[in-house]
Image (tube, helix red, strand yellow):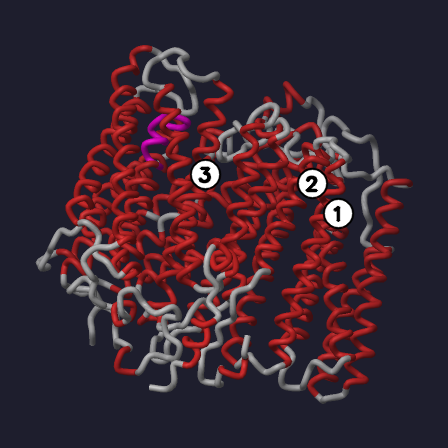
Amino acid sequence: MHTTAVAHEHHAEHPSGIWRWITTTNHKDIGTLYLCFSLLMFFVGGLFAMLIRAELFEPGMQLMDPAFFNEMTTLHGLVMIFGAIMPAFVGLANWMIPMMIGAPDMALPRMNNWSFWILPFAFTLLLSTMFMPGGGPAAGWTMYAPLMLQTGMALPFTIFAVHLLGISSVMGAINIIATVLNLRAPGMSLLKMPLFVWTWLITAYLLIAVMPVLAGAVTMELMDKYFGTSFFNAAGGGDPVLYQHVFWFFGHPEVYVMILPAFGIISEIIPTFSRKPLFGYTSMVYAVASIAFLSFIVWAHHMFTVGMPLAADLFFMFSTMLIAVPTGVKVFNWVATMWRGSLSFETPMLFAIAFVFLFTIGGFSGVMLALVPADWQYHQTYFVVAHFHYVLVTGAAFAIMAGVYYWLPKWTGHMYNETLGKWHFWLTAISANLLYFPMHFLGLAGMPRRIPDYPVQFTDLNQIVSIGGFVFGASQLIFLYVIIQCIRGGKKAEARAWDGAHGLEWTLPSPPPYHSFTEPPPAKLIWTHPYTGE
Amino acid sequence: MSAQAHAANHYYIPHGTHWPIIGSVGLFITAVGGALWLEGMDIGRYFVLLGVIVILIMMFGWFGTVIRESLSGTYNEQVDRSFRWGMTFFIFSEVMFFGAFFGALFFARVFVEHWLAGSSNNLFTNLLLWKGYEPTWPSNGPANLGGSFEGMSAVGVAAINTLILLTSGLTVTIAHWGLKQGNRKKLCWFLLFTILLGFSFVALQAHEYIEAYTKQNLTLGSGIYGSTFFMLTGFHGLHVTIGAIMLSVILIRSLRGHFTPQNHFAFEAVSWYWHFVDVVWLGLFIFVYWL
């Protein structure tokens, strides 16, 4: 081994207090910032959801006026997507990718800092709109024109917030691509990378491809509102449907941005707790790449009722159903990984198994929604709400929680409290189904989304949903407690915190040194294959 | 940062930096100011001015640090490759941004015009809302928004600007040859030509815009044609301006002898950007002016 002078020298100049966090270029510090910020936003967005569910506990108007209700649905969506799920994945990427590929840090550490530090400012802009004359944005997270153009003073603030979020995401994604392509330890060829790294590489590509398109879409809205252009105005030869096309060209890859890293996390966890190599590593990589490719040619399945020509409806129906093929490959591979494995059910594994079950339910309802004639019935009902909460909460959010439990011992050097973790899991999993499953029936029975009031026959199911929601929300306080407790102390974690775990990150001590690898790891540490060990 | 500690086979890791937070504050002030300004509050423009100044300070400071580190030999080949990947994907993100506006143009021309005139499943759109509307291009829509106007032509300013940008792509490449041969005179002169061509493009475009507003009655409010024309060419012109400013910085650095025939990534990054701006213009010339 050569000298450790580099790490040493940095240690001496390592600032402390708040200035350390503001000026840090360290991937672990920035990962921690992302994860803490995302947890904060998870509770902010969760608070909005609790208000929504409180209003919907009974028919009639109880707590808020309809405009505020619409603000809540809009901000809940924007905060959860751009504030909770995406930053959580970026935080996990920051923490884990350099350790998984044997790198010292991210490739562009200063830009890494900027990617994070734009976020708090962007959300200050976005959330401040709630206190402005006319209230916050209330046109839904999709911000459809022309409804969005009726927003008051909040409009330019919301749009500029989206611009800032886009800048942050693109810089973060560029950094991840540069890191993965350039900083892998010698000998780690692309098809030897852990799947979490693979999924993030593809996700980063998606982000760079589509965040600028979202910026373009909201810029057109800004121009239509303030500078008299006619992008979304039929009188001038434009078309409101154009907004939907541009938005969903962003929006569909965006939903895969929120699920592909989840696939990566699950593909790390299931082999560990099955004590078996991942089944079908290469097919997993190709499946993720196929899903990413398909995500660019399915966007109009969000718009089947908008009056597109039949040929377009059919094309987008068939292309959408194709996605079920690579997704099916992944689900079967996870199941095959567990088959005849030596399974144990620690909290990360529980969340991972719940992910496989519940995400698959969301996948199936997605195939139902892909059918044009059926979608004409389901569109804009609670069935859609049920679908995307199954994939984003019991899918993406469960994977994030699984990842947090899985890597907390690595990050903090302590084991978390397994009993409380299991309590958190069971309460979350049961309440999430209480919360989202009845939404399918509400939607099939005709209850529209984004309304503060409903006919009395929907009351029973709505009350079950709301109770599920409150339990779900309260259960997350256990999560917060477990994390804080684990940071402060607990049983010492070994380098390889889980006996079945593979990968370079587990060769580092827990917690790992400030700079993960200050020089390329010795060849014997680089596994030949991440899962087969060949 | 004590750069010398890093041997070539070590990884390069920079220190804590205060420039990003300054950049974020600058962006925040600019965004707040811009939003207030759009909402008719004149104080917003002072915020925008302040925000832009803060962002400029950040850029001077941040790039200055990177230039000093580069000159002191801190960076190894690996860092160079990271920069290359970073610039490549930044340009890709820009391509996608333009893609959104090109998409709007194609969608309007290929579909919307015909739908408003009743084709496909839109018979009643035409009968009930825009009876008698025929698809045309250039179009300001069935309501003739902004009044009659004269569209842009591919001959004239657009053709001259095409020649200018294509020539500038050639001159920047000759400058690169000069740099690789260690011929600083050639490098600097051809960089200067490129910059002059870039700014003359912007000047001609300004002239074109003035003509459009004063003589052709073509404005941002001229329906979908005005919207797509000004947004596409406007964002492109902005990129040409930024590119020309970046080339000017590279010229100053060339005059100071910052670049060696082996090591000049900043020059290459800016020339990539310049070629990107060039290619976007070819798309504009074909689809906005010509077809």
Residue that numbered label 2 is attached to: B33
Q: Are marks 2 and 1 on the same chain?
A: yes
| Amino acid of disc 3 | Val
User: Residue A152: where, in percent of width, then height?
Assistant: 62, 26
At 41% from the left and 72% from the top, the residue drawn is A104
Return the residue found at the far right: B215
Give yes or no for contact between labels 2 and 1 (Cβ–Cβ under 8 Å): yes
User: Residue A242: where, in percent of width, then height?
Assistant: 58, 37
- Magenta span has A386? yes
| Amino acid of disc 1 | Leu
User: Residue A166: where, in percent of width, then height?
Assistant: 54, 49
At 48% from the left and 31% from the top, the residue drawn is A74
Q: Are marks 3 and 2 on the same chain?
A: no
Give yes or no for contact between labels 3 and 1 (Cβ–Cβ under 8 Å): no
In the drawing, what numbered circle is on residue A79? 3
Q: Residues within 10 Å of mark 3 (few under 14, many from 20)?
A: many
The span shown in magenta is: A378-388
